Amino acid sequence: QAIRASAASSTRTSLNMGYTVGIVGATGAVGKEIRTCLEKSSFETDKLRIFGSSRSAGSTVESDKFGSIQVELFDVAAAREC
């Protein structure tokens, strides 16, 4: 199993594949801090999805690393896609 795990991690690195990360409550104070941490980290993130309430859904958040991101209305099914 260790060999398989090692092969899988080297494949991920060699293909430069990252993760899709979803942040629920991304427009609040904690969500903003998590976005800041992702901006500064080397965590392999291909796409960032941010979810919020009906009040913030549809607005756009600017990110240096991820560009313009539209806030999506929180939905359990959509969040599970991340």
Image: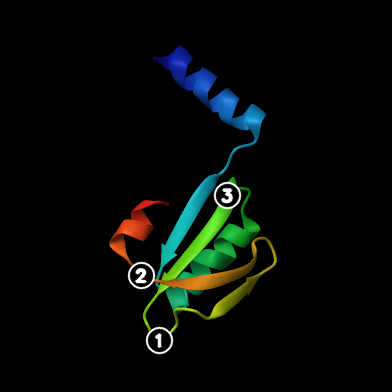
Q: Which residue is mark 2?
A: 74
Locate residue 27 relative to residue 1 in the image: left or right: right
Q: Report which quarter residue 14 is drawn in.
A: top right
Q: Residue furthest left?
A: 76
The residue drawn where x is 53% and y is 27% is 9
User: Which is more foreground, mark 3 or mark 2?
Assistant: 2
Q: Residue at x 45, y 82 (%)?
A: 56
Across and down, in percent, residue 76 comes to 29, 61
x, y percent for residue 70: 54, 72
Q: Name the secondary structure under disc 1.
A: loop
CA–CA distance in space, label 3 to label 1: 27 Å
Residue located at (57% from left, 58% from top): 38
Q: Could you say where residue 3 lies in the image, as x and y percent from the top left?
A: 47, 13
* Amino acid type, callout 1: Arg
Question: Is 26 situated above or below 12?
Answer: below
Q: CA distance from mark 3 to mark 2?
A: 20 Å
Q: Which disc, if any, is residue 45?
A: 3
Is label 3 or label 1 in front?
1
Q: Which quadrant would residue 64 be assigned to in this image? A: bottom right
What's the amino acid at mark 3? Thr
Determine whether 35 is above or below 9 in the image.
Answer: below
Residue 55 circle label: 1
Image: 33 above or below 77: below
| Amino acid at pointer 2 | Phe
The residue closer to the viewer here, 71 or 32, is 71
Percent coordinates x, y for residue 21 in the rendering: 48, 54
On the rendered structure, is 40 left or right of 78? Answer: right
